[in-house]
Amino acid sequence: MRKLNGSKPPGPSFTEGPLSSAALQQINPPRPYECLEFQRDLERLSAEYDIGLRVVWGPDEDQFNFDGRSLKKYRLIEGFVEVKKGDIVRRDGRDVGYIHPSGVITGEPPSRGCVLKPDIEYVQPAMDRWIIEQRLRDDVAKRQHAAARYAMVEQVLQYRCLNCDHEFKPDGPKRCKRCGSPFLQTILTRGRKIDALGPFPAEGWWMALLVVGVHDSDALCCNHFADIGKICIGSGPRMPDHRDLDIVLQSLAERDSRAVYRDLDEFPRELVEKSAAALTEKLIDRDDAHWDEIRKEVGEDIALLLNKQVAPTFDIGASTQKSTQKETP
């Protein structure tokens, strides 16, 4: 097995948070090697099981999204972080030179009267992992892509009266400003339509099948990601090998054993009916257990009331009789 850029794995580990100072210095590192042999193994499986498979390096994969703004496909955060590229030399309000972090000066060097301003670029951190992807069938993917391609943004929240259809801004009492009715419907009006996904990719639509990573023997990384509701990507990167091929083979075998995985257009009636029956049985068992608990508690209370050997701690009849005697003149 080849070493990963010497003794250290490529890129930062984000298990402690993607915005640590160490991580910022190594955001989106280049791929450490080419997985040509592993890709050939995937291509053999692709031909055998009639499915597109490939391995990609996470930081290399961009995704057209949000009105033409490019986002990382396997991003670790939704936003961007500032990374300093160097300094810009300015004279009389003009950019006249550039100083790289290595100290190399491009253009005019600084002189009296010049000012330096930091040259910042905004970068979106992506997971530094090898990822095995599968290609969705074009007929299915194109249909889903077309349904989600366009979106409305910058919409305005308003109320619509269900009584008189009057629309108004929610800037006062939650009653219709025209008829006073409290029965209102929340609606979104105006806004701007954007191309959120862009045209369908010429290479097809690929999605993650498996994230290749080193997992801690004590499951520390798995527990960390489970606590934040995420799929574990491991504590560090590693080169894909036969273990990952075994997982892919197991997934393909599972796909062939169930129609819901084998044919995306076929309604999984059998699977749905089995799941519904199992859920119904579970609810019935839980309901029976709940009623058994109630019967037990009520039965214990009634048994104490009817047990003659247990002396009552408070005689309601005697107390009422004494109170009545006091009130009688």
Image (spheres, helix red, strand yellow):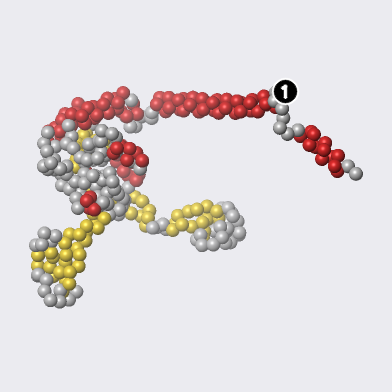
Please report the residue visible at 11 percent of the width from the left and 74 percent of the height from the top. 111
Q: Is residue 170 left or right of residue 192?
A: right
Q: Nearer the viewer, residue 327 or 256?
A: 327
Q: Nearer the viewer, residue 66 or 319?
A: 319
Quarter of the image with the N terminus is: top left
At which x and y percent is residue 48? 19, 26
Above or below residue 86? Residue 234 is above
Q: Amino acid at mark 1?
A: Lys
Q: Nearer the viewer, residue 158 or 211?
A: 211
Please report the residue visible at 9 percent of the width from the left and 67 percent of the height from the top. 107
Secondary structure state at the residue bearing disc 1:
loop
Please report the residue visible at 15 percent of the width from the left and 33 percent of the height from the top. 38
Quarter of the image with the C terminus is: top right
Residue 22 visible at all: yes
Q: Nearer the viewer, residue 190 or 322?
A: 322
Q: Is residue 189 left or right of residue 86?
A: right
Residue 43 visible at all: no
At which x and y percent is residue 190? 42, 58
Query: Residue placed farthest to the right in the image?
Result: 329
At which x and y percent is residue 297? 61, 28
Q: Which residue is mark 1?
A: 308
